[in-house]
Image (cartoon, grey):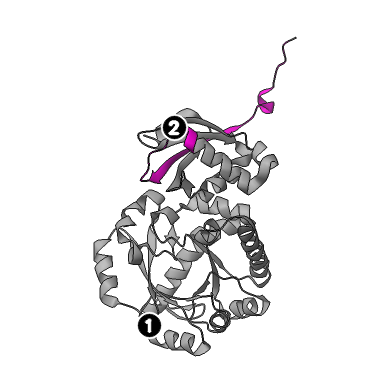
Amino acid sequence: MKFKVKPSQKENWRYIAFELVTTGVFVDQDVVKAITAANLRLYGEIGTSEENLWLIEFDKEKQRGILRCSHKAQQKVLAALTAITKINEQDVVFNVRGVSGTIKKATDKYLK
Amino acid sequence: MYDLHNFILTRKEEHAQYFQQFGIRGISVIFENNFDVRKFHELKERYQNLDLISVVEVVAERKGEVKKAIDKFRNQVDLIIVNARDTRAMRAAAEFSPIDFIAHAFVDQTAARDCAVNNVALEFDVADFLGVYGMKRATLISKLQFNLDLARKYKIPIILASGAQNVYGLRNATQIIAFAETLGFKHDEAKAAVLRNPFELVKRNRERRKGIEIAEGVKIVRE
C-alpha cells in the first residue's frame, strides 16, 4: 500500500537567500561546514536536528546561495548565520538578502 | 535601520560603501570624549544618502567626568552615550537624564531603577556576543537575560546595535532581530529594539534641539 501524506502533514520549507561579504573565495563545502559548526555550537545536536538544514545551491563566483530549513526553525537559522564570523580563518559575514517559501521566488527576488 | 553604535565612519571609513547592502539608513558617527564639528560636517557632505547622527561616547572613570561631558556636548550633538565598562561611570550615567543610553549596558538593579526614572535607555552590541565563545558567551547571555528582566520590570527602552568596527561586524536588521530572539527577546521587543527605539530616540533629540519638544512629553504643535 502506498503511504500518502496529506498536504497539511508535509514539511513547510523556507529558503534563505544569502550572500557572503568577504575578501576570500569559498566553495560550497566550506559554507556547509561553517553553517553546521555555528548551529551545533549555538543549539547542540538536538537543536540542529530540528532545523533540517540543506544547502540548495551556492554560486562560487558571486558567493551567493540558497539555504533550506524548516519554517519553524527560520529564526534559529538566521541567528546562527549571524553568529558566523570566520570561514577557514578568514573574516566573513553572511548577509541574508531575504527569506521565501519557494526556490523560484528566492532566486528571482533576492539573487538576481 | 538606524545603527546607533557603529564605529565604521570614524575607524574604517572605506567600509562605508557596504551600509546600503545591509539596509542601514541612519548611522552614528561616534566621537570618544570629544566632538569634531568639522569632521562631522565633512562626513555629512560625503554621505548625503545616509542620515548621519552625531554621537559623543563618554568613556569615564568618575561621576564628575560624565557631568562635565554633558555640560560640554549636550547642545552640540544628537546623542550622548556612556560606555558602561566602568561601573562608576555606568551608575553616574543612570542618574543623569541628559544621557541618552548606556552602551554595553550590563547594569544592576539600582542602576536599572535610576535608568527608568531618568529615561536612559540600555544598549547592547551584537559584536559583544560574536567576539566570544563557549563559557564566556554563555555568561554574557545570562547577564543579558538578567538585564532583559530588569528592562521589562522597570519598562526601560532597549536598543540593539551592531557595534561594528569594520564591515565584518555589520548585520542587517532581520538577522539582529533573529539573533535577539535566540538570546531571549520576544519578537516585538527585538523589533522595537532594532527598528523603533533607535529611530524614535534620534527623532526626539532632534526635536528637542530644534525647540519643538520643550520638556519631557511637551511639544509645540502650532505657534
Label 1 and label 2: CA atoms lie apart by 51 Å
Q: Is residue A34 magenta?
A: no
Identified at 60% across, 70% down, the residue is B106
Residue B160 image label: none
Q: Position of residue B43 (x, y in %)?
A: 27, 66
Identified at 39% across, 33% down, the residue is A60
* Host chain of mark 1: B
Q: Tell me the quarter of the picture where residue A25 sits.
A: top left
Q: Is residue B140 visible?
A: yes
Q: Is residue A3 magenta?
A: yes
Q: Which residue is mark 1?
A: B75
* Span highlighted in magenta in the image: A2-30
Q: Residues within 10 Å of mark 1 (few under 14, many from 20)?
A: few
Image quadrant for the N terminus of chain A? top right
Q: Which residue is mark 2?
A: A58
Image quadrant for the C terminus of chain A? top left
